Image (cartoon, grey):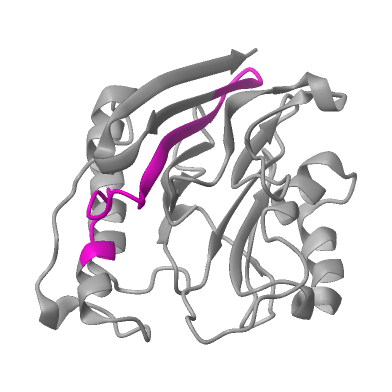
């Protein structure tokens, strides 16, 4: 994913509410949100990157969840392993969040820069691969894009604020937050080593600037009381053309 906001343990009725957008080249093959029964994992709910085999966001029936964003670093060499494998390894493994991240820290050079969230119903952990220090997150409302957690990028701040004001909102209202295509003034943009034209285009929460690249999907993940799990995904083609919606719920 490229933009995530999440409310962690803000309500006993909903320990986790996570919303986010996945931005990607439109030619990269992708499978829509589904149960991974064909792979022998019917307990896993996630989209699938059909090029590298991993995922950007997923949840299991028992409430293990994970999400990854890349760290924007245009000069970095491509590492041998796909970042999309990281959520999958956690979701299909047996290690708890802290042990998983501590083990991962010995292999960070195998992946291009990333932010990784891993958790369950009891705890949530975060790792920025450039810092290499796993961090247990306290209850709160957070956001992350392609820099560190809560970096003050305009779209990150806006989505975190929007989520904070809509903790009890419907999926439609939350999807509206993710659909904002506002571009921000140049003096508010980060300098991440790409051209100013690209910084402008990528400053939007919902990216529609090029026919070959943009927001491919928006997702809403809810972990709720009584072991309920709900994940809703809306998909988009070039220039933001709607391409379907899938909502799955376990209880």
Q: Is residue 170 visible?
A: no
Q: Position of residue 54 (x, y in %)?
A: 71, 46
Place residue 117 in its image quadrant: bottom right
- Out of 51 and 149, give the one closest to the viewer: 51
* Residue 21 higher or lower than 105, as above or below: above
* Residue 130 higher or lower than 83, as above or below: below
Residue at (26, 54) in percent of width and height: 210
- Out of 227 and 11, give the one closest to the viewer: 227
Total residue callouts: 0
Q: Position of residue 182 (x, y in %)?
A: 13, 54
Q: Position of residue 27 (x, y in %)?
A: 48, 45
> In the displayed structure, does residue 20 sit left or right of residue 83?
left
> In the displayed structure, does residue 163 sit left or right of residue 110?
left
Residue at (31, 40) in percent of width and height: 238
Residue at (30, 26) in percent of width and height: 242
* Residue 80 higher or lower than 235, as above or below: below
Is residue 220 shown in magenta?
yes
Give the magenta range. Answer: 201-230
> In the displayed structure, does residue 126 sit left or right of residue 71?
right
Place residue 155 in its image quadrant: bottom left
| Quadrant (top left, top right, bottom left, bottom right) of the C terminus | top right
Q: Position of residue 103 (x, y in %)?
A: 87, 68
Q: Is residue 39 visible?
A: yes
Is residue 123 shown in magenta?
no
- Out of 33 and 59, give the one closest to the viewer: 33
Place residue 225 in its image quadrant: top right
Q: Residue furthest left?
A: 185
């Amino acid at each position: 994913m490229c933009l995530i906001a999440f409310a962690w343990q803000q309500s006993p009725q909903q320990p986790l509410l996570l919303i986010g957008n996945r931005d990607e080249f439109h030619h990269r093959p992708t499978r829509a949100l589904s149960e991974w029964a064909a792979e022998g994992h019917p307990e896993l709910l996630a989209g699938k990157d059909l090029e590298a085999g991993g995922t950007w966001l997923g949840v299991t029936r028992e409430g293990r969840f994970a999400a990854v964003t890349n760290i924007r670093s245009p000069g970095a060499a491509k590492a041998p392993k796909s970042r999309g494998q990281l959520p999958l390894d956690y979701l299909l493994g047996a290690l708890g969040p802290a042990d998983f991240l501590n083990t991962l820290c010995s292999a960070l050079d195998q992946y291009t820069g990333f932010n990784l969230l891993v958790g369950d119903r009891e705890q949530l952990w975060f790792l920025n691969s450039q810092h290499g220090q796993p961090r247990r997150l306290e209850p709160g409302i957070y956001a992350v894009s392609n820099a560190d957690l809560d970096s003050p990028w305009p779209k990150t701040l806006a989505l975190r604020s929007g989520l904070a004001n809509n903790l009890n909102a419907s999926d439609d209202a939350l999807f509206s937050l993710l659909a904002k295509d506002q571009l921000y003034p140049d003096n508010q943009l980060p300098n991440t080593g790409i051209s100013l034209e690209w910084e402008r285009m990528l400053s939007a929460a919902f990216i529609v600037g090029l026919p070959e690249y943009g927001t491919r999907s928006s997702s809403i993940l809810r972990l709720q009381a009584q072991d309920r799990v709900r994940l809703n995904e809306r998909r988009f083609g070039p220039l933001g053309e709607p391409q379907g919606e899938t909502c799955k719920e376990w209880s």
